[in-house]
Image: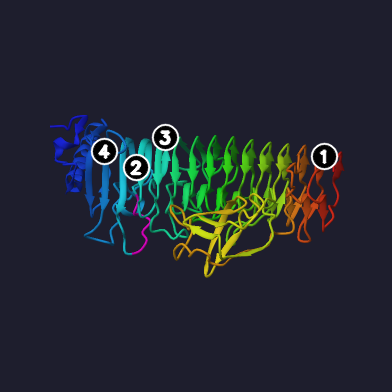
């Protein structure tokens, strides 16, 4: 007798009482429905009533044509545990190339996962294992992942690769990557490997939220350095906060990121680099209409890419170091990045330079941006302690201080052998970044005692709208406003070219570099060739 097209999990032996190990019954049900779909070609649906379903010591191998539908976050919850075998990861569902022979011909098709929670807090492996995910599926065709809450997994929460004709929507991933040091594979809220389906992967991520995850909020990663970086991927209306990186492109071609927010991430809000396993950065992408604000270090970090890449119409503000940082990581592509476009962005109130170029570029276009009021890290060195000094998990207060607002943004404050990073400050209070994503304190060894001595370093001398510290050839810089209109100006220059930088054959037209704290320009290396015209300084 063929299995029904829709079944109730309780009628097939799942208890959902928070005590019974439901994994054996769950695997039996998935196998039965998968076999029925393989026999008659008709996909099946498992409805899972409200309850807490324990999945203990064994991951469930998924089958094509089987969908899993709960009754909502907090109502239907799958609880993952591995007390009997600390060497075994326990994702709720997995199907991978290495473990199960997944590939284009042996794939999962026509399935949905929707309206449930995955609690990964009960899984701990002896060593970090990137397979200790919430969901770990590879080679999915015509999938839909909707309204999922995945949290506290040892590795990546939503860790599914090679998703063709698939939509990922409304996924909330919190505090995933518990066992990831921040430097290992995976450990993200939403991590998607790409390239397995060839040069085009039709994938949309929308209205997803990723907070407090060990590495990335959301990342795309090319999985084989012999594959072509794929096109066809879109990220829209997503939110990434308090992760190591917010949203990362580690190997796509033409990634489109729109209407998203990247706030309070520890390294960068948006990142293009060779951080991924194949050491290949993204290229051809467009980031538009996003707010990239208050990240502990940089708003945008871009490098290890041949280009092109375009950022248009974004707000890149209040970050703890640079608004936009062009740089390369060792071991990745270090050729000149070509055809990078920064157009109509509002790059303001960042701690150091609005735009910083530390890697070779050619054919840069810097057009119609407002790069203003940067260099906020202008306060001098401080040594304090004693009466009126107190500490909290995420702050330092000195009642005797009179600091300029945000004048210490991005500095490292030292208290004894401990250090913490300043995210912002009032006249008497330093607000501090959590020690790591998801942490509730800035202090490795506990909150310091009241009155403890503290030290803050001096501010960098140069903090410009644009600083060029590498070779830039054939740039076009047109129509930008690069000044400072604060009552106390902190952006020292409109444009600086350092002794290590060069600016060759540029067309620099109709920019406003007036109103900076010191001068419009500082050229330790004079520009060479090109055309300069109608500059308001």
SS for dot 4: strand
Q: What residue sits 18% from the left and 30% below the top?
A: 4
Q: What residue sits 24% from the left and 36% below the top?
A: 38
SS for dot 3: strand
Task: Tell which of 378 and 288 is nearer to you.
Answer: 378
Q: CA distance from mark 3 to mark 4?
A: 21 Å
* Residue 14 horizontal side relative to residue 181, left or right: left
Residue mark closest to the camera, 1 vs 2: 1
Q: What residue sits 59% from the left and 39% below the top?
A: 287
SS for dot 1: strand
Which callout, 1 or 2, points at the residue further toward the start of the chain? 2
Q: Position of residue 481 (x, y in %)?
A: 76, 39
Task: Please name the residue that numbered disc 3 is placed on.
Answer: 167
Residue mark closest to the camera, 3 vs 1: 1
Which mark, residue 76? 4
Q: Local crowd at mark 3 within 10 Å, few (<14), some, or many (≥20)? A: some
Which callout, 2 or 4, points at the residue further toward the start of the chain? 4
Q: What residue sits 16% from the left and 37% below the top?
A: 10
Which callout, 2 or 3, points at the residue further toward the start of the chain? 2
Residue mark closest to the camera, 2 vs 3: 3
Magenta-drawn segment: 127-133
Q: Position of residue 85 (x, y in %)?
A: 24, 61
Residue mark closest to the camera, 4 vs 1: 4
Q: CA distance from mark 2 to mark 4?
A: 27 Å
Q: Local crowd at mark 1 within 10 Å, few (<14), some, or many (≥20)? A: some
Q: What secondary structure do most residues of the magenta stretch adopt?
A: loop
């Amino acid at each position: 007798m063929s299995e029904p097209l829709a079944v109730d999990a309780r009628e097939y032996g799942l208890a959902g009482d928070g005590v019974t190990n439901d994994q054996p019954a769950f695997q039996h049900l998935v196998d039965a429905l998968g076999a029925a779909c393989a026999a008659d070609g008709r996909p099946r649906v498992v409805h899972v009533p409200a309850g807490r379903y324990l999945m203990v010591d064994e991951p469930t191998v998924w089958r094509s044509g089987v969908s899993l539908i709960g009754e909502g976050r907090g109502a239907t919850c799958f609880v993952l545990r591995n007390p009997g075998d600390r060497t075994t990861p326990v994702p709720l569902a997995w199907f991978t190339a290495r473990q199960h022979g997944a590939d284009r011909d042996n794939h999962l098709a026509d399935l949905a996962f929707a309206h449930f929670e995955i609690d990964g807090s009960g899984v701990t492996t002896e060593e970090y294992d990137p397979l200790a995910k919430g969901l770990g599926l590879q080679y999915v065709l015509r999938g839909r992942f909707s309204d999922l809450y995945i949290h506290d997994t040892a590795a990546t929460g939503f860790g599914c690769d090679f998703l063709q004709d698939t939509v990922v929507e409304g996924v909330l991933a919190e505090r995933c990557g518990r066992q990831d040091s921040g430097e290992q594979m995976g450990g993200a809220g939403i991590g998607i490997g790409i390239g397995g389906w060839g040069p085009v992967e039709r994938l949309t991520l929308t209205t997803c939220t990723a907070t407090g995850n060990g590495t990335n909020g959301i990342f795309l990663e090319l999985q084989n350095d012999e594959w072509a970086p794929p096109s066809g991927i879109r990220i829209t209306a997503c939110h990434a906060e308090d992760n190591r990186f917010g949203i990362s492109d580690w190997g796509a071609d033409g990634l489109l990121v729109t209407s998203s927010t990247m706030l309070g991430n520890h390294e960068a809000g948006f990142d293009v680099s060779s951080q991924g396993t194949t050491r290949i950065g993204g290229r051809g992408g467009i980031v538009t209409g996003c707010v990239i604000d208050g990240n502990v270090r940089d708003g945008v970090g871009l490098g290890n890419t041949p280009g092109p890449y375009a950022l248009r119409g974004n707000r890149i503000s209040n970050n703890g170091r640079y608004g936009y940082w062009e740089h390369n990581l060792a071991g990745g592509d270090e050729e000149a990045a070509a055809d990078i476009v920064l157009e109509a962005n509002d790059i303001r109130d960042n701690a150091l330079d609005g735009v910083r170029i530390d890697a070779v570029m050619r054919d840069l276009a810097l057009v119609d941006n407002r790069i203003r009021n940067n260099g906020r890290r202008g306060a001098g060195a401080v040594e304090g302690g004693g009466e009126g000094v107190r500490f909290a998990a995420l702050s330092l207060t000195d009642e005797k201080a009179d600091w300029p607002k945000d004048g210490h943004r991005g500095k490292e404050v030292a208290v004894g052998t401990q250090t913490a990073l300043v995210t912002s400050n009032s006249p008497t209070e330093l607000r501090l970044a959590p020690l790591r994503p998801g942490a509730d304190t800035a202090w490795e060894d506990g909150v310091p005692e009241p009155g403890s001595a503290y030290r803050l370093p001096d501010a960098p001398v140069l903090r410009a709208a644009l600083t060029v510290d590498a070779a830039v050839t054939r740039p076009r810089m047109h129509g930008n406003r690069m000044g400072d209109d604060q009552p106390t100006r902190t952006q020292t220059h409109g444009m600086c070219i350092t002794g290590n930088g060069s600016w060759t054959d540029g067309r620099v037209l109709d920019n406003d570099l007036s109103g900076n704290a010191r001068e419009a320009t500082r050229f330790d290396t004079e520009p060479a060739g090109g055309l300069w015209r109608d500059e308001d300084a």
